[in-house]
Image: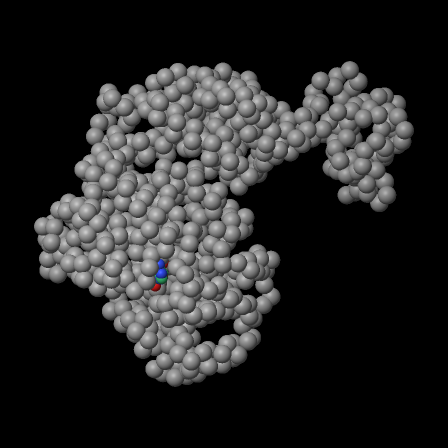
Amino acid sequence: MKPSGLPSSSNWDDIAPMSQRPEILFPLFSSLTGIDGIGPRTAEAFLKMAVEKPIDLAFTPPHNVIDRRPVRSIQDVVAPCVVTVEITVGLHSPNAIKGKPYRVTVEDAQTSFQLVFFHARADWLRKQLPTGQKRIISGKLEVFDGIAQMVHPDYIEPLGQTQDIPEFEPVYPLTTGVSQKLMQKATGSVLAKIPTLPEWIDPSLKAKHNWPDWDTAVREMHAPKGLDDVAQNAPARSRLAYDEFFVHQLTLAIARADMRQQKGAPTIGNGALKNKVLAQLPYKPTHAQLRSSQEIIDDMASPLRMNRLLQGDVGSGKTLVAFLALLTAVEAGGQGVMMAPTEILARQHLYGLQPLASEAGVVLEILTGRDKGSERRAKLAALKRGDIQILVGTHAVFQKDVEFCDLRLAIVDEQHRFGVRQRMELGAKGACVDVLVMTATPIPRSLELAHYGDMDVSILDEKPPGRQEIETVLLPNTRYDQVVERLKSAIAQGRQAYWVCPLVDESEVLDFTAAQERFRTLRIALGEAAVGLVHGQMPSADKDAAMADFSAGKTQVLVATTVIEVGVDVPNASIIVIEQAEHFGLAQLHQLRGRVGRGDIKSTCLLMYAPPLGKTAERRLTVMRETNDGFRIAEEDLQLRGAGDVLGTAQSGLPRFRIGDLESQKDLMKTAQDDARLLLSHDEALQSPRGQAARTALFLHEQEKSILLLSIG
Ligand code: ADP
Ligand code: MG
């Protein structure tokens, strides 16, 4: 074993001891069909609720609880509700007319009511409910036509045989083929097998929250004694939620430690290029830009590998910070690369940065999928020789045959869905490459820790001076003509505008048809020369030309699909019209709107929609009108869509938390991050008793796979 004992890509032997599940957990990971009452068919039904193994049952919390404690009379409760009461059986009224239910009148201590049975078997009912005898019944009481009745009681038991009726009954989320009773029974069998496990939670934290041991917590979670116990903050639940967060953060912390421990040559610049460029800038960097840039430069100078997130809302000036970091790599005698999500954005970086680079005597080049043949070969050779110092481009910059001479820094721009796994793959590109991921903030704070918990974070919390709030207006599409009139007078005053066409069924082809049609009509209305068009299906050279014309002010209106969604920067553009805005998600609308408000002109965003608006769409558009704050928008987005959708769970590597709730328990996530990092800093091989226990927790939550995944990269 290497000293840290953590798995690394170079040595598979290290992984083996980590990847063997402890025997004590075997019963929880055996087949479901081993449980009484579960056959292959039922097991299949359980699959639909993502229950594959006994442990999945243990981790499926009830969402409600039924109180079946007996009352004296149904008059003590307010229907509809579940009630348990002792009754004397009265007269049976069989279903004389076909299709009518079978009724049995019963009497409790104070009043009488009816039991109702559809498709009843009379002989069975007479045996269960003999007239004149006492029984305990339990079921849902309702009032129908002014009469209290209970349809198909859940329990009918003779007095003294009430042990089958639980005082409190957990209620689970279900799927077809799985009934409450089956779920309760199956869960009960699993609970009987729950082992006692060594404790992985820090004792003082556990005491502070009054958390039970793991096995007690699982049993308590499944045995709620009232609504308080099914609440998210009930001690048993909150402990199990914490376990999920802790395991997740531990996985991230292991990945982080594994990455940082790969030492490389520290990248130390002398500031010469950086200062040259700063002196050339037409503006002064903001404090936030200077601070973030210093954080990054310090991190690069340390012998540990950088794994950092630069977060800043649309228009906060991330590009400059990135460029200063790239220059530092060059000052240190190395190279830097920046990857953008689209070709348009990669080119914009080229046009925007190349003049600054050449002033400073730095060679900056672009590489995208468009580079082919001999030209591409020449670029690759120059890159390998070290003649190109800074490379910008699309994901093409990370293709297999792209080799650097001495790559020090890799930057990923505007990659909101760039997950833990992709970051690790990127890190594998160079032996000691520092990694910087840049993102605007479509990620709510509550998700940030879960998603970026392995990274250090720099934040641009300040916009360049002189920026004005963007005014956002909602308009029904019936006002199209007025919008065009308004646009006409705006362009007469020298303003520029984007016109974004609807996203139709996520289909590129349909998108572009809509955009072409709008291009045609706007050219008629505003003049041929004034309007440009850009969409994903266009040949790249035409795309460049359209962007360049707009950027240079040759066209005043740019009709576009969402290809302009991210990163595009034309500061003179101060109007954006978004057609059928109700089809866009919040994060997308915020990104699109971020295309304006980038200069000191007051900007406007017109959101056009087809009435009537659905509830969610209305809420989205209202949020857009009310705020420009990326964080608030991200939080609303989370509320409207849920975490999986916001991040694209599959790509993001964010686990599905079965018990924990990111929104209401974000403080726990923070605690989990601190605790996981602390544990690892004392015990990087997880060898201490608590470290060993933490390994068990990783297995319990099946994170051993993601450890392998992360470390292989
Ligand atoms: P984003 O964070 O969205 O990537 P950009 O880096 O594209 O933002 O910057 C947005 C615009 O603001 C660009 O036109 C850029 O030149 C300009 N800019 C950046 N920093 C400053 C500053 N400190 N003062 C004035 N303008 C700035
Ligand atoms: Mg940007």
Q: Is residue 22 above or below residue 454?
A: above
Residue 138 placed where, x, y %? 75, 28
Residue drawn where x is 36% and y is 67% of the image: 571
Q: How many marks?
A: 0
Q: Is residue 577 left or right of residue 252?
A: right
Given residues 501 and 137, the one toward you in this image is 501
Residue drawn where x is 88% and y is 26% of the image: 109
Given residues 510 and 100, the one toward you in this image is 510
Residue 187 placed where, x, y %? 56, 25
Residue 48 placed where, x, y %? 50, 38
Image quadrant in which you'd find residue 36: top right
**Which quadrant is the N terminus positioned in?**
top left
Given residues 694 and 163, the one toward you in this image is 694
**Which quadrant is the C terminus positioned in?**
top left
Does the rendering let one see residue 169?
Answer: yes
Q: Is residue 677 above or below residue 609?
A: above
Residue drawn where x is 19% and y is 52% of the image: 272
Residue 356 placed where, x, y %? 22, 61
Q: Is residue 392 left or right of residue 160?
A: left
Does the rendering let one see residue 22?
Answer: no
Residue drawn where x is 39% and y is 41% of the image: 452
Q: Is residue 397 left or right of residue 315?
A: left
View extreme (right): residue: 110
Given residues 104 and 214, the one toward you in this image is 214
Q: How is the image coloured?
A: one colour
Ligand 1: give its quadrant: bottom left
Image quadrant in which you'd find residue 226: top right
